[in-house]
Image (cartoon, coloured by chain):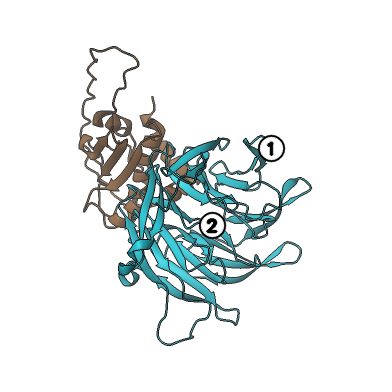
Amino acid sequence: MVMGLINANPVVHEKKERRTRETPGNTDENAVEPIDQLEIFDHIRDIKDPEHPYSLEELKVVTEDSVEISDELSHVRVTFTPTVEHCSMATIIGLCLRVKLMRSLPPRYKVDIRLAPGSHATEAAVNKQLNDKERVAAALENSNLLDIVDECLAPTLG
Amino acid sequence: MDGSGGAVELRETHRLTGHADRAWALAWNPNPGSGVSPVLASCGGDKTVRIWKRAPDGAWQCTDVLEDTHNRTVRSCAWSPDGKLLATASFDATTAIWEYSGGEFECVATLEGHENEVKCASWSPSGSLLATCSRDKAVWIWEMQPGNEYECVAVLQGHTQDVKMVQWHPILDVLVSVSYDNTIRVWADDGDDEWHCVQTLTESDNCGHSSTVWSISFNQKGDRMVTCSDDRTLKIWDTSIDLSQPNTGEGHESWRHVSTLTGYHGRTIFSAHWSSEDVIASGAGDDAICLFVEEKSSMVDGPSYRLVLKKEKAHDMDINSVRWCPQDPRVLASASDDGTVKLWELQGNILD
């Protein structure tokens, strides 16, 4: 089945240069190093858009400011902005973000994924679905869906 | 230590490990047989069901693993009232019925019909009916026939989204279902084998929930019910009106909201369970367990409920199920995304 692209000509932005982390003066290997905004952004910036050969960063679906984190409360919230407000890929993008963070963060983290307010026609419905862990678990047992997610996550590995 | 006085405490007594993925649900066998110690079933994302029993030395061990029947997550399980059958609901769209015979569990029936994930199964008080619910928005009622045959006697349509859980009233043939559509629906037979929705409890009309309703539990008498939700509240309902006899009496007598317990959990409340000693336990996405009892002294303003204790960090991850042991109402089991099942003992005088 041939389908038209949801957004045939997305605006592509330049990637931000990766900042190198400052080496902490303290070299105690056992010191707990808190997870910060940039570290979370590094996990998700290279996720490939489901319908374009560009990353979520290049399409400005996520920026560093999309990430809110409280390491103390073990809570992360990612707010993403689809390129068009009827984007039917929003759920897939959200699922990719959730799976990537599930696989990257220590299990104690609580992750909330949401659409930027006003960025999508069915914002509330997509947000509800992305944060219902039973639906997410069921979706990830669907091998077709999991293949799509894994393909989008492939550039983020390594 | 006689356990009847002093500060109230929920003490972890056992940690049951074995599930290779999140543990979704728990069921204590209501009737394990006379002289037999309690029996617990747990199920989860590893597609298995595990049966746990207490050995003579007091340690808990996994005696049976029910596997190779469901090929996706086993979302929940339920023992029949006589304790002889176990129903398991799976994301693979089927419900399996297991019987313990000849020293092992055997799958004696597979109920097919739902279009996709089955989330819950519940036996009616007599054990003759089994209700199941699914992401396909439907609730099915099955009647047990001789020879391990199950006939679908009703398909209940009404919810507009996934149905998360079904639970029969403890005495009457009245069924309750809760949903991703934020509502609670009550179903009864009109006496002519036709099942109808006899009441819908919503946010706007009944002071109901404002997001997904995850779980329901009745008290032993069946005149109260607790529900819990993604809106981070628990709600207590007066269910003393007999809705199995519709169209009797004047006006619209129905179940009604009694109390909302809010501010106790910081994330989605996935499970609530009412003990035979009237202690309500809740388990949530904030990794905590809370216990509540009715405040008997404040009947002036109607019944209210107070927090007895909050056990922070009861598990390392979300708590999906809390269940009081029917044979020992001071023993609570909990199941978590961290893959473990824990047993807890409630100590101290909760009525202080």
SS class, disc 1: loop
As rendered, which of B71 and B242 lies closer to the eye?
A: B242
Say what amino acid the circle numbered 2 marks.
Cys
Chain to which the residue tagged by mark 1 belongs: B
As rendered, which of B189 and A105 lies closer to the eye?
A: B189
SS class, disc 2: strand
Chain A on-screen colour: brown
At 30% from the left and 56% from the top, the residue drawn is A124
As rendered, which of B337 and B30 lies closer to the eye?
A: B30
Say what amino acid the circle numbered 1 marks.
Pro
At 31% from the left and 18% from the top, the residue drawn is A31
For the question of whether residue B12 can be seen, the reply is: yes
Numbered badge on residue B56: 1
Circle 2 sits on which residue?
B120
For the question of whether residue A143 can be seen, the reply is: no
At 60% from the left and 43% from the top, the residue drawn is B48
Residue B312, image x, y percentages: 38, 40
Chain in cyan (letter): B
